[in-house]
Image (cartoon, helix red, strand yellow):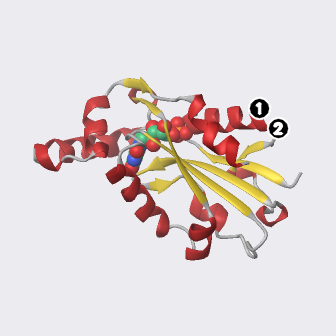
Amino acid sequence: MNEIIIYGSYYGTTKKYAEELSSKTGIKACSYKDIKDINAYKTIIYLGGLYAGGVEGMKKTLKDLTDISNKKIIIATVGLADPNDKGNIDQIKSKMRSQISPDIYEKAEIFHLRGGIDYSKLSFLHKTMMNMVYKKALSVPEEEKTAEIRAMIETYNKQVDFVDLNSLDPIINSL
Ligand SMILES: Cc1cc2nc3c(=O)[nH]c(=O)nc-3n(C[C@H](O)[C@H](O)[C@H](O)COP(=O)(O)O)c2cc1C
């Protein structure tokens, strides 16, 4: 009742993590689109897919939080790039800082999970975006290619699934 798992997911990988976390913890999971009163919860676990560095739905959902003094906040990102690469984590975190207030950022425990992509299922807009990013990525000199750029090039136009449900364990341990 006092705890909630909220997810922002276009193509289901983040939802899959959220549902697994829900079944392992007994905490209800729902899309950020269905959240009515975020302040009603004491423990908030937000999982969001990464889209051009942004965490899907996070800004919109967490901006409604008022008093966070007695709250536990966990945020987990789900992206294609390697979540064990320090440069990638730094980049994700720096973008996250611009999407949530400094007090929420400081209070939140942050985790990074790996998702997947199936180009045949992408919307026209997302396909177009990825095509532009891919072309740009190819022009980056080899020694300057980050984990994110490499992951992008390696998976372009393919179907890949890096979802590892065991990577939820640190989040479960924190709860
Ligand atoms: C348009 C677009 C932009 C993306 N941007 C990023 C990104 O900035 N960083 C990243 O690691 N993955 C990025 N991805 C990959 C998604 O984060 C990955 O596919 C994730 O598993 C999607 O979650 P979902 O299935 O819950 O929607 C992008 C994918 C698309 C289609």
Q: Is residue 91 visible?
A: yes
Which residue ends up furthest to the front in the rendered image? 173
- Give me the disc on residue 26: 2
Q: Quadrant of residue 15?
A: top right
**Residue 166, image x, y percentages:** 59, 30
Q: Are marks 1 and 2 in contact (CB under 8 Å)?
A: yes
Identify the residue position indicated by label 1 in the image: 23
**Residue 167, image x, y percentages:** 56, 35
Task: Please determine whether, in this image, residue 165 is positioned above or below residue 110.
Answer: above
- Give me the disc on residue 33: none
The kind of residue on which mark 1 rests is: Ser
Which residue does the image show at 26% across and 44% down from the upper left? 149
Q: Quadrant of residue 13?
A: top right
Element on which disc 2 rests: loop
**Residue 5, image x, y percentages:** 73, 47
Task: Please determine whether, in this image, residue 91 is positioned above or below residue 160.
Answer: below
Which residue does the image show at 57% across and 70% down from the upper left? 106
Which residue does the image show at 51% across and 67% down from the upper left? 99
Task: Please determine whether, in this image, residue 144 is positioned above or below residue 104.
Answer: above
Residue nearest the observer in this picture, 79 or 31: 79
Which residue does the image show at 73% across and 72% down from the upper left? 68
Task: Please determine whether, in this image, residue 157 is positioned above or below residue 37.
Answer: above
Q: Quadrant of ligand 1?
A: top left
Mark 1 neighbour class, 10 Å CA radius: few under 14, some 14 to 19, many 20 or more: few
> How far separated are the C-alphas under marks 1 and 2?
5 Å
Q: Is residue 139 visible?
A: no
